[in-house]
Image (tube, rainbow, N blue to C red):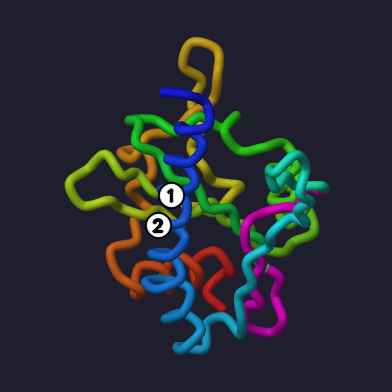
Amino acid sequence: MTRQTGGLRAKKSGDAGEEALTKCVLEPLRRMGEIGRYDKLNPEYRRVNGLFLPVANSGGDWVLCGRGGLYIAAEAKSTTADRFARNLIPAHQQAHLDDAVRSEAMAFLFLRFTKQAIPICYMIPWALVPWRVLVSAQSVSADECQPWAVHSVGDAKRILIEERGGR
């Protein structure tokens, strides 16, 4: 597989994951009044030699407006592997999530494992991601993320309420 083919496959997988996230989690939470709005952040792109390349970093994938104006940063990732490596999240996106936590806002990693027959999405509070060092890098498995599995919008609502302290 070429780097370009691998990149296109990753983009398609990410697009499908983000579409599922929007349809099954974000839009239902908005309709329920748990979030006021959600916006996908996209970096600015410029055409260079026939390719569109990002000219700046954009932080996490999503920003959400929670109850009471609470800022929520979110990063959405998808993997076909058994484990998801932390280093697959670019440093500027990790920094966005870290900054949100540090400023007492909320931050989530929406992680989708697609190896199962039915892909499962996990809505993990960034500060609670159960990273484990295997060999030399931090990673996490679907089994380690079970407390944050999202099988329905009710699960997403429960996780959101728990993270904001029951409010």
Tell me where the magenta segment starts and ends, as one range.
Answer: 56-71
Three-letter amino acid code of the residue under disc 2: Ala
Q: Residue at x 74, y 52 (%)?
A: 59
Q: Nearer the viewer, residue 3 or 22?
A: 3
Q: Along the horizontal axis of the image, is 90 left or right of 148?
A: right
Question: Which residue, given by chain and number where applicable, does mark 1 sit on?
Answer: 12
Question: Which residue, given by chain and number where applicable, does mark 2 sit on?
Answer: 16
Q: Are marks 2 and 1 in contact (CB under 8 Å)?
A: yes
Q: Quadrant of the C terminus?
A: bottom right
Q: Is residue 142 above or below residue 67?
A: above
Q: Residue at x 37, y 71 (%)?
A: 24
Farthest residue to the left: give it: 117
Which x, y percent locates residue 164? 59, 69
User: How far is mark 2 from mark 1, CA to CA?
Assistant: 6 Å
Q: Is residue 50 magenta?
A: no
Three-letter amino acid code of the residue under disc 1: Lys
Farthest residue to the front: give it: 50
Q: Is residue 57 magenta?
A: yes
Callout 2: 10 Å neighbours few (<14), some, many (20+)? few
